[in-house]
Image (cartoon, rainbow, N blue to C red):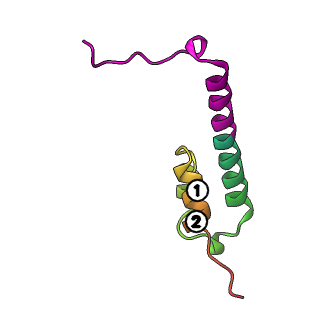
Amino acid sequence: MHGKKKKKSWKDMTPGQRVGVLVVGAGQMALLIAAQRSISKTPAAQIRGNKAVWRAASFINFFGPLSYFLFGRRRGTA
């Protein structure tokens, strides 16, 4: 069974890898919190689709919050 790789545990990671995991995790949490706050504060008329659907989608790592910010909000007419 040479094809299977064992997942690295926290103690098997180098200090640089640990920092990388923490930075990526913090970035994901920041995006999630920003999307959730935006969904809460933005009127439903300015959001494409259902707020509850966007709220649930924002929990999908990186993809959900970024999709909301790129496609979920209506642009103002200037």
Question: Relative to 77, is 11 on the left or the right?
Answer: left
Question: Relative to 31, is 48 on the left or the right?
Answer: left
Inspect the image, locate mark 1, and give the three-letter code of the amino acid beneath it: Leu
Bin the neighbour count of mark 1 within 10 Å (Cα to Cα): few under 14, some 14-19, many 20 and up: some
Residue beneath the point at 54% across and 43% down: 61
Q: Position of residue 42 (x, y in %)?
A: 71, 66
Q: Position of residue 16 (x, y in %)?
A: 66, 25
Q: Position of residue 77 (x, y in %)?
A: 68, 87
Tell me the SS state at disc 1. helix
The foreground one among 7 and 69 is 7
Question: Relative to 60, is 23 on the left or the right?
Answer: right
Above-or-below relation of 33 to 8: below
Q: Which residues are magenta?
A: 1-26
The foreground one among 11 and 39 is 11
Q: Position of residue 2 (x, y in %)?
A: 27, 14
Inspect the image, locate mark 2, and give the three-letter code of the amino acid beneath it: Leu
Residue 75 placement: quadrant: bottom right
Q: What residue is pinned by disc 2?
A: 70
Instruction: Decide whether residue 62 is among the magenta residues.
Output: no
Q: Are dots 1 and 2 in contact, CB under 8 Å?
A: yes
